[in-house]
Every structure is written in structure tokens, then in C-alpha cells.
Image: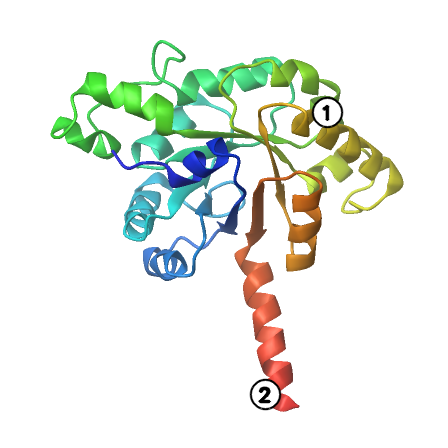
Amino acid sequence: MITNLTKAKLNAGESVYGCFFRTPDPTLAEFMGYLGWDFLILDAEHGSLEPNRAEDMVRALELRRVTPLVRVTTNQPHVLLRFLDAGAQGVHVPWVNTPDDAERALQAIKYQPRGMRGLAGVRPATFARQLSLKEYVARANEETLTVLQLESGEAIDNLNDILAVSDIDVLFLGRTDLSHSLGYAGDTSHPEVEAVVARAVEQITASDVALGVVVPTVEEAQLWRRRGARYIATTLEAVVGASSEAWLAGARA
């Protein structure tokens, strides 16, 4: 079983950098693997990715030792299971609003004794060839990265109780949906939204759980690192859009 280098860096107190990637194409994923990202988030929530395609994209990223993660569509055991069995080294779970939501995710992500994920000799288990299932269960529980997304005012109100749930690696602030839930859709800089975000940042950074965010620019990445975020993502659209505009402006100057 492959070591989760992103989780190892987080456990060592380091910051990690990744990219949301919604295009279900293994060749493009392989190319992205050469660019230096710590992790790529294969987006099944806001993309068309299915488990069989995710499996090929995971293989492509494993070639470059980039951590393959999947943002799933919903917090349901059968959904989480299929992407994890495809080889994802961790998952983003959307819309975690309560400690019960968080615990339900952990039960689906982890094997016994922590959880109740269904067990089979699938590809991350080396098809039961190089690892026994007993060895695989222990390794998988150690290596799998759990990222829970906080995307509503309810989630922030319940944050202390969510933080009390064991084995969460990253709490990820979904500020766009948070602004929507607070009545300011898309206005993440609104003072009321920022006040709720600031409260969440204070609680998360005071804990052992890493703070995660998505940002469009290098400047915002630096800002959020100063605010205490250690799991920092952007999007393929933001990176390609900015670099394309800069290239064209320079070429046409």
C-alpha cells in the first residue's frame, strides 16, 4: 500500500498544496502529476467523475507520488466505499453540518475498530497479494486522509462538537456555500460571512485538525497560510485561466 505523503506532511506540521480537478481524464491527471502538487482532488461532486474513471486517474497520479483524493457527491457509505476501493487515498466529504454527520463519514471511511467500511481485496489492498487483509486494514486506517467540508452556518455553530469527533485530518471551509447559507450567496467578503469564517478559523487552528481552504490566487494562498491554513487548494480553472491570460498579454504586448 502506498504511503500517503500529504497526510505525512500534515502530521509533521507542514503545509500542503493541491488542486481541484473536475475533468475525468487520466492523461491530463498524469500531466498534472508532473507539476509539483502535493495532492489532486478529483471532483465527483461538481464534475462527472465515476469510480471506474477515478481508478485510472488514481493510477496516473500514483506514478508521480501525488496524493489522489476524491470529493464525493454525498456522505453515504456506498458512495465513499466505491471511490476508496478505486484507490483514492482520502476523501472530501461535503456538507458536514453536525457531529453525527462527521461520525457517519468516519464510520464509512475507516475499517474496524474505528469504523465499518466494507472490506474486500481490492486494488488498494494489492488484491490481497502483497498484503494480508489484516495488514491492509491497519495500513488503510493509518493512511487514509479524512477531509470534512464545513459549508453552512449550522456547521460552524456545531464546530466544537465536530472537533470532538476523532480521526478528522482536515476541516475544510467551503466559503462559497457558507456565504449562500448565510444569505449572501457568492459574497465571501461580506462582513457577516467573514465574522463567521473568522470564528471557525480560530476554533480550528486552536485544535490538532488542519484548516483547509480553496483560493483562486497565490496572494490568497499566502494570506490563508498566515491565517493558519495548512491544507491549501486552488482549482484547475484558476491556474489555467491566470496563466493563459498572462501568456496572451505578454505575447500581444
Q: Which mark is residue 203?
A: none
- Residue situated in front as seen by the camera: 3 or 233: 3
Which sits earlier in the primary sequence, circle 2 or circle 1?
A: 1
Q: Is residue 217 visible?
A: no
Q: Position of residue 208 (x, y in %)?
A: 58, 24
- Residue situated in front as seen by the camera: 179 or 32: 32
Secondary structure type for disc 2: helix
Question: Farthest residue in the left direction?
Answer: 129
Q: Is residue 235 visible?
A: yes
> Residue, x 34% and y 11% (percent of image)?
112
Q: Position of residue 248 (x, y in %)?
A: 60, 82
**In which quadrant of the rendered image does the N terminus lie?**
top left
Residue wearing tag 1: 156
Q: Quadrant of residue 86?
A: top left
Q: Is residue 232 left or right of residue 42?
A: right
Query: Dot 1, how many residues are within 10 Å of its Cα: few (below 14), some (14-19), or many (20+)?
Result: many
**In which quadrant of the rendered image does the C terminus lie?**
bottom right
Amino acid at the residue labelled 2: Ala
Q: Quadrant of residue 145?
A: top left
Secondary structure type for disc 1: helix
Q: Position of residue 122 (x, y in %)?
A: 22, 30
Question: Farthest residue in the top direction?
Answer: 113
Q: Quadrant of residue 192?
A: top right
> Residue, x 43% and y 40% (percent of image)?
6
Q: Is residue 163 left or right of residue 197?
A: left
Measured along the vertical axis of the image, is residue 51 above or below residue 122? below
Residue wearing tag 2: 251
Measured along the vertical axis of the image, is residue 118 above or below residue 35? above
Amino acid at the residue labelled 1: Ile
